[in-house]
Image: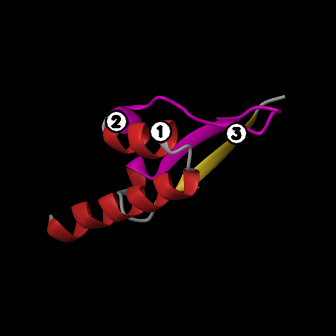
Amino acid sequence: MASSTKWELLFISAADGTRQASSSSGGKMQLLETEFSRAIPELIELHLLRQDSIPAFLSALTLDLFSRQTIA
């Protein structure tokens, strides 16, 4: 049975604030393809596909979003 997880990200507007992932019964997380996920292919490629690290991905994503908010 698959379950769903929602992430609330602080550094983006409320309209874009929820990102979804699903997990299978085997415990694998899968980021669902959205407009947002299509905008960050480098982060996905490096941290999720090559390094297989959700913590590294979330850290890099947080820093990227923080930079976008503080520079803008």
Query: What residue did someone put label 2 on?
Result: 41
Specify whether 1 is left or right of 58: right
How many angstroms separate mark 2 from mark 1 (CA)? 12 Å
The residue lying toward the viewer, choosing from 49 and 40, is: 49
Over which residues does the magenta segment extend? 16-38
How many angstroms separate mark 3 from mark 1 (CA)? 23 Å
Specify whether 6 is left or right of 39: right
Point out the frontmost of discs 3 and 1: 1
**Badge 3 vs badge 1, beta-carbon distance below 8 Å:** no
Measuring 60% from the left and 39% from the top, which residue is drawn there? 21
Query: What residue did someone put label 1 on?
Result: 50
60 above or below 35? below
On the image, the x and y values in percent for residue 42 come to 32, 40
Measuring 37% from the left and 39% from the top, which residue is drawn there? 36
Kindly identify the amino acid type of the residue bearing the numbered disc 1: Arg
Kindly identify the amino acid type of the residue bearing the numbered disc 2: Pro
Q: What is the crowding at mark 3: few (fewer than 14 residues within 10 Å), some, or many (at least 20)?
A: few
Point out the frontmost of discs 2 and 1: 1
As helix, strand or loop, the secondary structure at mark 2 comes to helix
**Badge 2 vs badge 1, beta-carbon distance below 8 Å:** no
Query: What residue did someone put label 3 on?
Result: 4
On the image, the x and y values in percent for residue 11 come to 37, 64
30 above or below 9? above
**Which is more N-terminal, label 1 or label 3?**
3
Kindly identify the amino acid type of the residue bearing the numbered disc 3: Ser
Q: What is the crowding at mark 2: few (fewer than 14 residues within 10 Å), some, or many (at least 20)?
A: few
